Amino acid sequence: MAKFSQPPRGTRDFVGEDAELFIDLVSKFTEIARLNDFKPIITPTIEYFDLFAKKSGVEIVQSMYVFRDKAGRNIALRPEATASVIRAYLRNLHKEPKPLNLFYVAQCFRYDEPQRGRYREFWQLGLEIIGDESAAADVNILYTTSEYLNYIGVKHFVQIGNVAFYRSFMDSMGVNSDDQDLVLHYIDKGLFSNAEKLMLEKYGEDASKVLRELYYTDVKRLSELINGYGSLLGERCSKISREVEKTLSFTDALRSIGIDVEYSPSLVRGLAYYTGLIYEVKAEGLDLSIGGGGRYDGLTEVYGGPFEYSTGIALGLDRIMMVLKEKGYVVKALPRVIVIALESSTEIYRAAVSASRTLHSSGIAARVLSEPRVSKALSYASRKGYLYAVIIGRREIETQLVTVKDLMKGEQASLHISELAEYFKQRLLDLL
RNA sequence: GCCCGGGUAGCUUAGCCUGGGUAGAGCGCCGGGCUGUGGACCCGGAGGCCCCGGGUUCAAAUCCCGGCCCGGGCCCCA
């Protein structure tokens, strides 16, 4: 065991089926994102620490990998990708016509104690839409997400919330931003009574009462509620009403396209940069969430750019892998053929390579194995799960025919190289 | 940062409680049975500082202490 060292705590090697699954899930995500017309963006794994510090609290800094590089720069391994995407947008893409739809696959790092579904090195699949104020952008994000999850067979539902209700209300009551964060924190943790108490003690009975009603009133009846407090809320009233309308139409739109969605007043997603609609994606049968996101309008301003509306989601690839492994998901393998070159002469090698190229062009995985002993080669081929072996030796060169062996049935045939493609197409078509 | 569990061959692990003999097994790997025909089968082989250090003992994988590492739970979760 000591001979080969383990990877650092919280990191993993992906080998065998895990590696196959990883690649499969990434490529399917790419495929769905592209079909929905998102464009790829690739940003660095390291960023200046300040990029993340700007929008994150003190405790977040403690769980980041931060170091000084050789020139003394303060560098961090990215704990998430949105900040980088916004930075790169402001630098490279801000003149593009809006809205701008982007997707990414990002390796991220967090220095925390590892546990189930949680690693120090993890992967996020993300979608971002910049420059679209309407809830249609959020629908687009979730529709694409849902299409992906359906594609890979992950049954899921979406919880939505809207931090703007609370924020706007607290703004109108003059609640300072630290207290706002604290209230949202309590709500997030299911400690609503603490939130209520804080409001009561520092901002009075009305504040506490309205917060309570915001929390307990169904979103469908929120409009009436808000209008009833018109005098109290002042100009924020219309802002909240707009958000209520947005949330309702968002919910309806998601349901109409077959997405399982529920409104949850306690969903506020911590103290992050979210400004309005927020969502969390849950997989059936898993208590952990597999993704989350929402509105972060104005984050561009934090990085010195003009105000832009933006929204996005990040999916935890590691957790999706966990769900699929528990379900026994198997990556569909390409049919594989081994081409056995019995001698290492130029003639035989050329014929072997030519045969394998022919197979590639039909979408069949094939490789050349140079091995003078047929028994060794076939033993290897069957243990490695090849479906067919093409054998090329002296005999085959003389007759201009190659030997094809069906490793499942044990049957064998001789045919000309030009017939190979057709032969395999007939036999492997249903496997492609 | 706190709490629990674990570390024996490439992998999965038995043995540990109740100390004792060259530390076993399954899978995998290599070779042979078989110099142009695989899987199954048979035979053989390689591969272990039993995580590290210290202690107790005639004797430690086994008991005790310390350390390192890993996993899981709490906290946190951008």
Image: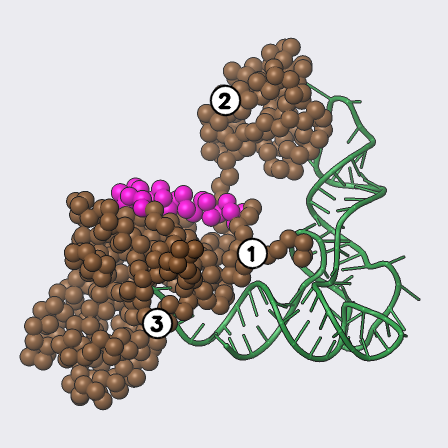
Chain colours: A brown, B green
Residue A313, placed above or below residue A399: below
Q: Is residue A138 visible?
A: yes
In the rendered structure, which disc, 3 or 1, sits on the residue that comes first in sequence?
A: 1
- The residue type indicated by label 3 comes to Val
Farthest-out residue, front: A71
State whether residue A260 appears in this view. Answer: no
Tell me the CA gap for discs 3 and 1: 29 Å
A93 to the left or right of A376? left
The residue depicted at 28 percent of the width and 78 percent of the height is: A182
Of badges 3 and 1, the one in the foreground is 3
Identified by mark 2, the residue type is Thr
Q: Which residues are magenta?
A: A17-41
Q: Position of residue A367 (x, y in %)?
A: 56, 29
The type of residue carrying mark 1 is Pro
Which residue in the structure is indicated by mark 3? A58
Image coords of residue A213 (percent x, y): 20, 79
In this rendering, position of residue A318 left or right of residue A307:
right
Q: Which mark is residue A114?
A: none
